[in-house]
């Protein structure tokens, strides 16, 4: 039986949680009674450096699920095509099933992380123009940088889709910079994942959280993201809770 969205969201998660399709580094994906919809569970597991460093962050799944839901709702209201349907029971998102591109799209507004290491820039310098990078989503290869020619040769998506992905990613950057600035956070850099829906349209998938964004407090420049886990800085759970408080507590 094919079930509609309203039927599914009105039922307890345990009833609609089907076969485990993917156990990832921070989330699990489950089938639902509808072929077009999946359940995405946010876990407390954390990894860094392509999975070499592993751990757990208390209540991360709860915080990230709420943070990502608030951000996806905002992007949806701004007219962006996203996979988000509804948040369920704190840690779950009901999402549209996508054929994901094996691509990560990173946008950088301020120099940090691998950009600093690779190009020798000073951390914290605002870039004269933001940068968009593609990487191949492949932990074994260390998520290497890709340009449009690599994407074409590896056939990761069509050329039209690359153009649309770039357009959407720049729009998202403009929307999110404002969104976080209103919450006294600087959006240093972030990663997006896109996919194709069953009708062939381009859709933003995955999550937008302190796992996938660098967020610094606007006044103190305190890091409120996964860098605290990556570099053993302490105060990790407090940092996620603080982003949750600023993003998801607005009612
Ligand atoms: P990883 O697989 O990189 O360890 P996660 O733990 O975040 O990462 O697992 C989530 C997985 O779900 C990722 O592989 C991501 O590409 C995939 N995904 C995200 N949104 C969707 C969607 N709407 N449909 C299908 N797959 C998705
Ligand atoms: N990022 C991510 N997943 C990845 C790689 C990067 O979410 O597999 C995010 C990361 O959190 C940061 C941005 O993308 O916000 C840029 O990351 P960077 O290339 O600097 O990599 P890092 O030094 O964090 O490994």
Image (spheres, rainbow, N blue to C red):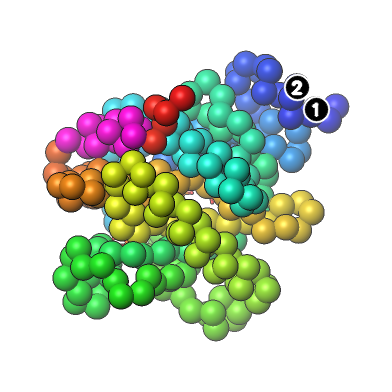
Which corner quadrant of the image does residue 125 belong to?
bottom left
197 left or right of 69 in image: right
Q: Nearer the viewer, residue 36 or 180?
A: 180
Q: Which residues make up the magenta segment? A: 235-246
Q: Nearer the viewer, residue 63 or 243?
A: 243
Proximity of marks 1 and 2: CB atoms separated by less than 8 Å:
yes
Q: Is residue 202 above or below residue 116?
A: above
Residue 161's disc number: none
Q: Position of residue 56 (x, y in %)?
A: 29, 34
Image point (48%, 41%), residue name: 71
Image point (20%, 63%), residue name: 124
Q: Which residue is mark 2?
A: 7
Q: Position of residue 219 (x, y in %)?
A: 18, 47
Which corner quadrant of the image does residue 83 belong to?
top right
Say how many tags the image has: 2
Q: Which residue is mark 1?
A: 3
Image point (75%, 22%), residue name: 7
Q: Residues within 10 Å of mark 1 (few under 14, many from 20)?
A: few
Whether 239 is among the magenta residues is: yes
State the residue lying farthest toward the right. Answer: 1
Judged by its main secondary structure, the magenta piece is helix
Q: Is residue 201 visible?
A: yes
Image point (60%, 44%), residue name: 76
15 left or right of 7 in image: left
Secondary structure category for the residue under label 1:
loop
Q: Position of residue 179 (x, y in %)?
A: 42, 47
139 left or right of 48 in image: right
Secondary structure category for the residue under label 2:
helix
Q: Nearer the viewer, residue 3 or 143?
A: 3
Whether 228 is among the magenta residues is: no
């Amino acid at each position: 039986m094919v079930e509609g969205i309203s039927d599914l969201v009105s039922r307890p998660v345990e009833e609609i949680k089907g076969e485990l399709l993917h156990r990832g580094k921070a989330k699990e994906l489950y089938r639902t009674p509808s072929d077009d919809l999946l359940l995405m569970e946010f876990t407390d597991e954390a990894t860094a450096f392509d999975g070499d460093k592993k751990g757990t962050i208390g209540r991360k799944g709860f915080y990230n699920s709420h943070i990502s839901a608030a951000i996806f709702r905002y992007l949806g209201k701004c007219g962006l095509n996203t996979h988000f349907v509804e948040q369920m029971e704190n840690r779950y998102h009901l999402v549209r099933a996508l054929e994901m591109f094996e691509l990560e799209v990173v946008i950088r507004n301020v120099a940090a992380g691998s950009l600093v290491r690779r190009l020798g820039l000073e951390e914290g310098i605002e870039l004269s123009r933001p940068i968009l990078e593609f990487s191949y989503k492949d932990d074994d290869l260390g998520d290497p940088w890709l340009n449009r020619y690599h994407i074409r040769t590896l056939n990761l998506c069509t050329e039209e889709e690359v153009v649309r992905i770039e357009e959407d990613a720049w729009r998202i950057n403009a929307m999110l910079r404002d969104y976080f600035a209103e919450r006294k956070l600087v959006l240093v850099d972030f990663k997006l994942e896109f996919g194709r829906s069953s009708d062939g349209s381009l859709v933003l998938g995955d999550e937008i959280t302190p796992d996938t964004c660098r967020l610094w407090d606007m006044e103190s420049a305190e890091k409120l993201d996964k860098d605290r886990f990556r570099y053993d800085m302490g105060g990790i759970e407090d940092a996620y809770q603080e982003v949750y408080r600023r993003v998801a507590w607005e009612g």
